[in-house]
Amino acid sequence: MTSTTTTRPVPTGNAQAPGPALPGIPFGRLLRVEWDKATNTRAARWLLGLLAASTVGLMLAPLLAPSSIDQTYTSYLSFPAAALAILLPVVAILTLTSEWSQRTALTTFTQEPRRTRVITAKVAVSLLLAGAAAVFGALITAAGLGVAAATGRELDANLTAGVLVGYLLSVLLNVLMGVALGALLHNSAAAIVLSFALPTAFALLGLALKSWADWIDPSTTLTWLLQGQWPGHMPQILVSVAVWVAIPLAAGLVRTVRCEIT
């Protein structure tokens, strides 16, 4: 018995070939959208307004209490840095958790399925806000120094390039710690509470375990940055950055990419 095998020809003329892949959303547009989310809401405007007011308010401390506060350029700069460290991480947390707190994650990640690009845009916006806030804090410091000089007060001009770099790094790292918690937890309230509670807890732990505090207490490492002592403490600072920024941010990115959105 013989059998005949018939091969069907592959159509070439009328077959509809798959079209080219549609281009993704440009990253610049993602940045603009995330910037609007971070700044163009009522809550964000209130937070940014309070941030500006607290920065100006804390600058009054060295002006009104010259006898109890060091009258140096570095001392004056530390007050805006302290104000920025309180509320600026909260803004960053809300930027990272907005998709889940406002239940827009499904819409956002449907329009841009590549979730890493969305998270990257959110981190970039947080860093841009941190840079703008650092410049604002520096301007408030300059204004405070000008007022002090106008009253005839003698100030120790001990501001160096290392102090300025450390000031900028401390602001950026404070924001990145908020970013990391927001990316990891996806919950605004929990991330905000932990952003205040965990550093306080580690600071108290550091009182009992001084050798550990130099490595894992962010308040210790950020103080070195603000005082311009970071070149001599880079190993401790890098470990602290890994514990508070790199590891939780990487874990948050993995969770965001893998989590199921309903």
Image: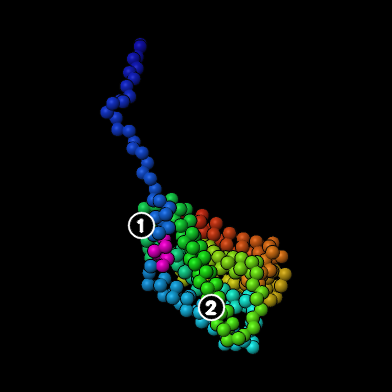
Label 2 sits on a secondary structure element that is: helix
Q: What are the residue bounds of the magenta stretch?
A: 34-39
Number of numbered labels in the structure image: 2
Residue 82 at x, y percent in the picture: 57, 75
Please tell me the numbered disc located at residue 184: none
Q: Is residue 82 above or below residue 113?
A: below
Residue at 49% in and 60% down: 123
Name the kind of residue labelled 1 in the image: Thr
User: For residue 107, which numbered disc appears in the image?
Assistant: 1
Which secondary structure dominates the residues rendered in magenta?
helix
Which quadrant holds residue 198? bottom right
Front residue of 102/8: it is 102
Residue located beneath label 2 in the image: 143
Q: In the rendering, at what x and y percent does residue 62 appear?
A: 59, 83
Image side of residue 195 versus residue 108, left or right: right
Q: Are marks 2 and 1 in contact (CB under 8 Å)?
A: no
Q: Is residue 251 magenta?
A: no
191 versus 16 height, above or below: below
Write down the quadrant of residue 199 in the picture.
bottom right
| Few, some or many residues within 10 Å of mark 2 (<14, 14–19, 20+) | some
Which quadrant holds the N terminus?
top left
Question: What residue sits 68% from the left and 76% below the top?
Answer: 207
